[in-house]
Image (cartoon, helix red, strand yellow):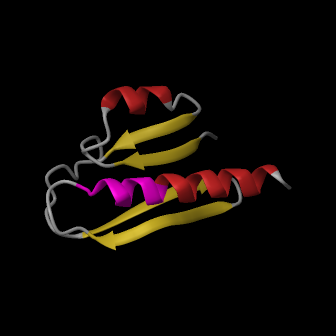
Amino acid sequence: MPTRVLVDECVPRPLQRELTAFQVRSVQEMGWAGVKNGALLYVAKFSEGIYVLHAFQKKSQKTARFELEFARSRYAAVVRSRGRR
């Protein structure tokens, strides 16, 4: 089963299309588009379990770039650590 990735509304579609090794879903596809001011959670599911990459209180419609970069760096760290097994 491919790894599932949930992306926020502000992630560009071209970037989503580049993630061909993953099962990518957007918040729009999940029916969560336009949800305002709430907790946002970035997770990645692998065969051994689900990793919480980043969780924070979203305070505006657009997700801050540093929040996205933090989640990306955490995802990269999880992928690297899984490769060492």
| Image quadrant in which the C terminus is located | bottom right
- Residue 68 magenta: yes
Q: Which residue is pictured at 65% across the width and 62% down the height?
A: 49
Using the image, determine if residue 17 lies above or below residue 82: above
Of 20 and 75, the residue lying toward us? 75
Q: Horizontal and vertical percent for residue 64? A: 27, 57
Which residue appears farthest toward the front when viewing the image? Answer: 66
- Whether residue 22 sits left or right of residue 84 in the image: it is left
Q: Is residue 61 visible?
A: yes
- Residue 70 magenta: yes
Q: Horizontal and vertical percent for residue 23? A: 50, 37
Using the image, determine if residue 78 lies above or below residue 59: above
| Image quadrant in which the N terminus is located | top right
Q: Which residue is pictured at 24% across the width and 43% down the height?
A: 28
Of 52 and 71, the residue lying toward us? 71
Q: Main secondary structure of the magenta part?
A: helix
Q: Horizontal and vertical percent for residue 25? A: 39, 41
Of 34 and 1, the residue lying toward us? 34
Q: Is residue 46 visible?
A: no
- Whether residue 13 sits left or right of residue 42 in the image: it is left
Q: Horizontal and vertical percent for residue 50? A: 58, 62
Which residue appears farthest toward the right when viewing the image? Answer: 85
Using the image, determine if residue 4 lies above or below residue 35: above
Mark count: 0
- Whether residue 47 sits left or right of residue 54 in the image: it is right
Q: Which residue is pictured at 55% across the width and 37% down the height?
A: 22
Q: Which residue is pictured at 32% across the width and 30% down the height?
A: 13
Q: For the magenta stretch, what is the residue range?
A: 63-71
- Whether residue 22 sits left or right of residue 68 in the image: it is right
